[in-house]
Image: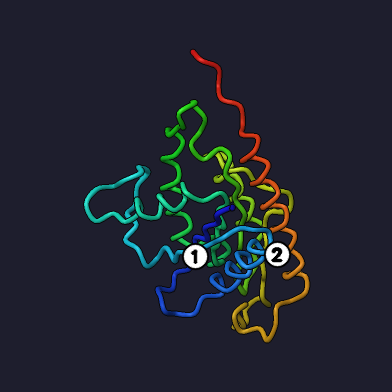
Amino acid sequence: MLRALALNCTLKPSPGESSGELLAQQVLDALADHGATGEQVRVVDFDVRPGVETDMGEGDEWPRIREKVLAADILVFATPTWMGHMSSVAQRVLERLDAELSETDDEGRAILAGKVAVTVVVGNEDGAHAITADVYQALGDVGFTIPSQGGVYWNGEAMQTTDYKDLPETPEKVATATATLARNAAHLATVLRERPYPAPPEQ
């Protein structure tokens, strides 16, 4: 059984409606069709301190989220678009994941190697392609593997107020991209579980 975790980096605390939550949940539902169980975490609901350590001390709630990241086979990284960029919450999550560069498993592999990551970007302005590229790079650097066509996004009409959550139905192209993402992510996660990356040679 594969496990998936969606980190929703909306700026809106619960119970506010979130377009990112909707599309991330659609990705989790699509992954369920391939045998993956999943949950979603709204990061802004936690006190995630700034920093690049796995634990920034008293009051830092990132370690609780980190445990879920380490337990998952597939990470769904969801962010809104603000002023053409990912949210500040998304940037903070990437900064906290930077600490994993120095963490290894018992055989010396990067601790996140063997885990798959996909992206979800929503917004009623341009920027989804640039955000996806930035997130791919960051997640790849810390050890995640990105599957073929591992991103889904929705951009509304610029300078308008319609959000993804306001649409009467899911656009066909978004639904198709979500299905492809889930199929490829589940396949890759299964392959990496069965055939892990090789461990580095002993020094």
| Dot 2 amino acid type | Thr
Residue 165 occupies which quadrant of the picture? bottom right
Q: For the point 64% across and 58% down, which residue is it?
A: 35
Q: For the point 67% across and 57% down, which residue is it?
A: 151
Please identify the residue farthest to the left as the structure is shown.
58
Q: What is the secondary structure assignment of the residue under circle 1?
A: strand
Q: Residues within 10 Å of mark 1 (few under 14, many from 20)?
A: some
Q: For mark 1, what is the residue? A: 40
Q: For mark 2, what is the residue? A: 178
Number of disc labels: 2
Residue 89 occupies which quadrant of the picture? bottom left
| Dot 1 amino acid type | Gln
Mark 1 or mark 2: name the one nearer the start of the chain.
1
- Marks 1 and 2, Cα distance to the nearest angstrom? 16 Å
Does 72 sit left or right of 118 as displayed?
A: left
Please identify the residue farthest to the bottom as the structure is shown.
168
Please identify the residue farthest to the top as the structure is shown.
203
Depicted 53 relative to depicted 81: above or below? above
Q: For the point 24% across and 48% down, which residue is it?
A: 57
Q: Position of residue 64 (x, y in %)?
A: 35, 54
Q: Position of residue 30 (x, y in %)?
A: 67, 65
Depicted 148 relative to depicted 175: above or below? above
Relative to the observer, which residue lies in front, 31 or 81?
31
Relative to the observer, which residue lies in front, 184 or 81?
184
Does 202 sit left or right of 150 as displayed?
A: left
Depicted 193 relative to depicted 119: above or below? above
The coloring applied to the image is rainbow
Q: Position of residue 126 (x, y in %)?
A: 65, 67
Q: What is the secondary structure assignment of the residue under circle 2?
A: helix
Q: For the point 45% across and 28% down, which residue is it?
A: 106
